[in-house]
Image (cartoon, rainbow, N blue to C red):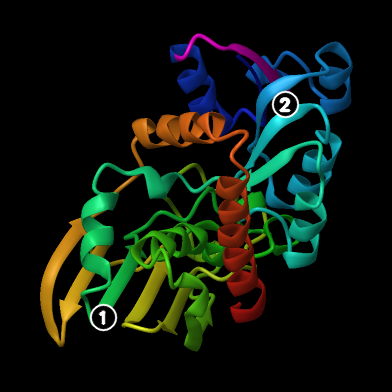
Amino acid sequence: MKTLIVGLGFGQLYKKIYESMGAEIITVDTDQSKKPDFVEITTAIDAHPQFDTAHICTPNRTHFALAKALSGHSKIVFIEKPGVQNVAQWTALTHDKKTKYVMTKNNQYRDNIGDMTNLGHKMSIIDLNWKNNNRIPSPGTWFTNKHLAFGGVSRDLLPHMLSLLIVLSPTDYEKYNVIDKKVEQRYRLEDCTDTDYGQVKEDGIYDVDDNVYLKLVGPNNVINIHTAWRTDEEDDIAVHMYKGKIKFRSYALGLCPEEAYQSMIENHIKNLNNEEFWKEQNKQDLFIHTVLENAI
């Protein structure tokens, strides 16, 4: 198996996973200090025209162009959340018959997903919470620059929560409608003296949402999604399920384990020639892109 990893920030995780799988790994990053094999994608493709998988782990604004460059050069291209900028770009990519494109939805491969799915349709209210005490990603860098990231927590944590909504309501997720929302920027760069993720770039840009709430109503229940990079309160990173107003069960989430990423990769490779699988993946990715584009 041969894989291409573009972007060696988060891409280091994939590099480690593929090393454990015994794959041939080609890396691309514009930062030579990260010791990539290539600093530019076209030279990597010239030297290695065909891959089994590719992973795009670069700033959000670059995803679409890099994905297009890989058309016909990789059987599968995984694009890190939030995918691309809008539904039109995603539709343009997935009309390609030479390569299969998919947004990474690693949280769908957690060990306890089956338990959540079995309970989900029986609950009247589900809270999907990813609220951090202080985890704004590298304030002042591309993560908090709307031009480069398209948004803040809405393009970082919210896609993860929408992918969980899908597996909690696998036959009905397209029927959920956003009936209430609150999108806020609660902090400024000068408020960010430290963070639990990365470092503060004091002369950078911070112009994105950092706290988002969505209320979605579906056929069987209400799902509240709360995402926040920073609350200055105790972390609440969990799925809370209610029968009526009584909390029935909670599932702690925390950072997604490496095993989930590997299971995701292996499942997509196994289903390479299963067209129904890819139709479903595209439906899910279109649902996520549509909510992000219309609700935020």
Q: Is residue 50 above or below residue 65?
A: above
Q: Earlier in the sequence, mark 2 or mark 1?
A: 2
Three-letter code for the amino acid on which mark 1 is drawn: Ile
Name the residue nearer the viewer: 196 or 78: 78
Pointer 1 local density, CA inside 10 Å: few below 14, some 14–19, many at least 20: many
Looking at the picture, tell me which residue is in the foreground, 79 or 27: 79
Evaluate whether residue 235 shows in this view. no
Tell me which segment is drawn in magenta: 21-31
> Mark 2 sits on what residue?
29
Estimate the spatial distance between the alpha carbons at disc 2 and disc 1, rounded to whole Å: 43 Å
The local crowd at label 2, few if under 14, some if 14 to 19, many if 20 or more residues have their Cα within 10 Å, is: many
What kind of residue is marked 2? Answer: Asp
Residue beneath the point at 11% across and 72% down: 248
| 239 left or right of 259 in image | left
Q: Which residue is drawn at 51% across and 18% down?
A: 18
Relative to residue 220, is residue 30 drawn left or right? right
The residue where tag 1 is placed is 125
